[in-house]
Image: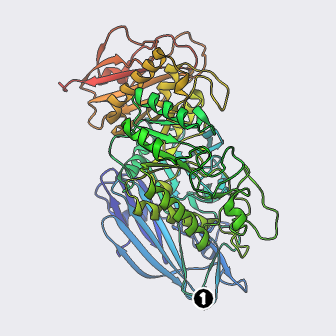
């Protein structure tokens, strides 16, 4: 392999060099065009300074403490006698082509081999990975294997995320002048609190301006991410799986591979960088291109009250308003009359469904809708037949009283017998019923998650969950699966490789959802983002919102209704039907277009939307979250349209409030420069407009 290697797609350039036995990203950013790579390396060569070692250790993909790297080492581990803890790799082999570089290094003293990989995805993403193999003659305990990507000196602003159940994906922005920012997740899932996504960019970067870099760990278990400015001035982002003590012990010949780290870059701001992640999701084999069915979910309509007659009436109402999928949520199985029992007993309850699910499914299918079902396969209730028969099938530390969460424990899927039992139950359920969709929930975090021998096991459990989903998908390729973990607790590209939808949050409060969905859209496209119109009074917050605001909030995602439609009169049902019809009419644009988030300043509003890839149309929403110092919002300037095209602009009538009395025609240049004046808006309200472009002059 010549060194360095230039990977480019005309939008992004990645220059990869070799640091000993490891790949090193020399440059990642805007496309360089034709470049003299040797001259580039000479231009970027850093001199040795006082107070430092005589040769600066490179910020390679897996930085080496043994070479003097002053930051977090990429690999940590040791032999049983404490040796092998600071390896230094020398090159064994290297391969490269126009989109991929792989380097294999070996440390004969430590008895380790390391392969590092750098790839430029067709979607424009950077993809990096590494595999360490124990080539010694004794076990090697791995502490971590994490991947480091350099960031330029001007990437000083960083965004990390914090949250909780029903308040996911809230951004925390800071300027990192020195030291490090760490993001750690130990919940056993992607988590509500610290999802594995960070953004960095120029000071003050926004949606439409400045260099922006994103780092995402495509993994559904524990994770560690770090943004660091080293004492020597270099900046780097690090990401990898967070392993428990002794969780990975490599026997001679065994190997460990990192989850992929996926990086997005744009010189034109956060919105454009987000689109690279969206292109990646849309290219995944699991991604469905058929229209996303509008669904009705029964949870906030009936909870555990599964009266068959009432469910049929609810299905009738669902079909009446234009729903295309009816999802029966928790409460259909075994003795599950509340949330204290029966997880693991995946058979249809004879008490509430004496004739099984077949009559309800036939009724739903007869109305022209698909049928979906809620399951939580990774869990087991202490009060269940499964636990009474197999109390040892729990993912917990032996010898300790288990810690309950929501009256439940985690089923140890690393055990072959437990895995087979839950797989066979779900497989039989899908074979015996015409089920098109599974809402796959996971409502309890890992606490001291240990296998039967008492060793940390979140890593193995996560792979077992992947394997369980993969096997069911192979056997039932027509069944779609939603990733739900108490709402938005498992949103990552590892799970999206095998599911079609994520449940963005258990919170259907439209005000909370505006923030949650806005920042979720920095990673995932609208069509995989479950977004439901809930009841007027939110189940989780107690707030009351108008139907138009609730509809405008859910409109841009994979639309659903989670509301007791039996409480609605004919006029209300007609309004809901009109909203569903409007969404279905514009669904192709909403679910194939480019996301658009618009910087607004501080006037109490946010703006977002979607633009057709050919810029022939757009839908934009202006949302007032709070009051502001001004009586009117600032004019809405809409970027990223065809500057020379004229657009006819009209209201999308989701409610009683209107923006435009009559359609307006403006060019894309006018909309970007002087914009459009919004009307007066009350807090917690939204207005939507549709822009239809005429042929460019």
- Percent position (x, y) of residue 155? 53, 48
> Is 628 rendered above or below residue 145?
above
Residue 454 is left or right of residue 515, and the answer is right
Query: Which residue is depicted at the point 52% across and 65% down?
Result: 424
Quarter of the image where one finds residue 329: top right
Query: Which residue is depicted at the point 50% across and 31% down?
Result: 314
Q: Which residue is mark 1?
A: 109
Q: Quadrant of the C terminus?
A: top left
> Is 520 rendered above or below residue 452?
above
Crowd band around label 1 with a 10 angstrom C-alpha radius: few (<14), some (14–19), many (20+)? few
- Percent position (x, y) of residue 50? 65, 66
Q: Quadrant of the N terminus?
A: bottom left
- Percent position (x, y) of residue 130? 50, 70
Identify which residue, 50 or 366, lies in the foreground. Answer: 366
Residue 222 is left or right of residue 278, and the answer is right
Visible in this render: residue 540?
A: yes
Identify which residue, 152 or 342, lies in the foreground. Answer: 342
Identify which residue, 433 or 221, lies in the foreground. Answer: 433
């Amino acid at each position: 392999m010549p060194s360095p290697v230039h990977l480019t797609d005309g939008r992004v350039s990645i220059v990869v060099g070799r640091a000993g036995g490891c790949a090193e990203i020399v440059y990642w950013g805007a496309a360089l065009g034709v470049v003299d790579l040797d001259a580039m390396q000479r231009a970027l060569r850093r001199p040795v300074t006082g107070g430092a070692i005589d040769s600066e250790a490179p910020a390679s993909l897996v930085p080496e403490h043994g070479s003097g790297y002053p930051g977090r080492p990429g690999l940590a581990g040791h032999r049983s006698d404490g040796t092998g803890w600071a390896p230094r790799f020398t090159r064994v082999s290297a391969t490269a082509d126009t989109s991929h570089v792989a380097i294999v290094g070996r440390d004969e003293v430590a008895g380790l081999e390391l392969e590092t990989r750098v790839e430029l995805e067709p979607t424009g993403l950077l993809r990096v990975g590494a595999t360490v193999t124990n080539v010694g003659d004794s076990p090697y305990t791995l502490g971590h294997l994490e991947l480091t990507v350099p960031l330029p000196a001007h990437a000083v602003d960083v965004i990390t995320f914090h949250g909780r159940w029903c308040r996911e994906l809230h951004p925390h922005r800071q300027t990192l002048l020195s030291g490090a920012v760490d993001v750690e997740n130990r919940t056993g899932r992607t988590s509500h609190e610290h999802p594995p996504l960070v953004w960095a960019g120029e000071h003050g970067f926004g949606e439409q301006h400045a260099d922006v870099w994103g780092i995402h760990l495509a993994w559904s278990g524990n994770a560690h991410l770090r943004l660091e400015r080293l004492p020597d001035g270099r900046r780097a982002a690090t990401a990898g799986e967070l392993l428990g003590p002794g969780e990975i012990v490599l026997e001679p010949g065994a190997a460990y591979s990192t989850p992929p780290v996926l990086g997005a870059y744009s010189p034109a701001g956060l919105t454009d960088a987000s689109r690279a992640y969206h292109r990646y999701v849309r290219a995944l084999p699991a991604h469905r291109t058929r229209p996303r069915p509008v669904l009705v979910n029964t949870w906030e309509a009936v909870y555990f009250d599964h009266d068959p007659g009432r469910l049929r009436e609810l299905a009738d109402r669902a079909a009446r308003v234009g729903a295309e999928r009816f999802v029966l949520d928790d409460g259909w199985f075994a003795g599950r009359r509340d949330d204290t029992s029966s997880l693991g007993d995946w058979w249809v309850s004879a008490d509430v469904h004496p004739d099984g699910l077949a009559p309800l499914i036939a009724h739903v299918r007869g109305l022209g809708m698909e049928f979906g079902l809620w399951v939580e396969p990774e869990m087991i209730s202490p009060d269940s037949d499964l636990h009474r028969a197999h109390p040892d099938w729990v993912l917990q530390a032996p010898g300790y009283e288990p810690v309950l969460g929501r009256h439940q424990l985690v089923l140890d899927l690393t055990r072959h017998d437990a895995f087979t039992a839950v797989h066979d139950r779900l497989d039989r359920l899908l074979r015996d019923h015409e089920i098109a969709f599974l809402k796959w929930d996971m409502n309890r975090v890992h606490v001291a998650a240990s296998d039967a021998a008492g060793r940390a096991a979140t890593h193995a459990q996560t792979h077992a969950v992947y394997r369980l989903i993969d096997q069911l998908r192979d056997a039932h390729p027509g069944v779609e699966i939603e990733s739900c973990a108490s709402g938005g607790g498992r949103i990552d590209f590892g799970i999206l490789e095998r599911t079609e939808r994520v449940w963005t949050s258990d919170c259907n409060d439209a005000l909370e959802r505006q923030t949650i969905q806005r920042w979720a859209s920095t990673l995932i496209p609208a069509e995989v983002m479950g977004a439901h119109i809930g009841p007027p009074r939110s189940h989780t917050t107690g707030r009351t919102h108008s139907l138009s605001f609730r509809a405008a909030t859910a409109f841009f995602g994979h639309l659903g209704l989670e509301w007791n439609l039996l409480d609605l009169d004919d006029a209300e049902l007609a309004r809901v039907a009109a909203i569903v019809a409007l969404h279905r009419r514009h669904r192709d644009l909403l679910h194939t277009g480019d996301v658009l988030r618009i910087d607004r300043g501080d006037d109490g509003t946010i703006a977002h939307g979607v633009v057709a890839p050919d810029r022939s149309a757009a839908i934009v929403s202006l949302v007032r979250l709070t009051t502001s110092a001004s009586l009117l919002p600032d004019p809405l300037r809409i970027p990223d349209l065809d500057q020379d095209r004229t657009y006819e602009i009209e209201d999308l009538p989701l409610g009683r409030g209107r923006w435009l009395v009559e359609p307006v025609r403006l060019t894309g240049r006018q909309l970007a420069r002087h914009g459009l004046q919004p009307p007066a808006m009350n807090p917690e309200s939204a207005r939507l407009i549709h822009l239809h472009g005429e042929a460019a002059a």
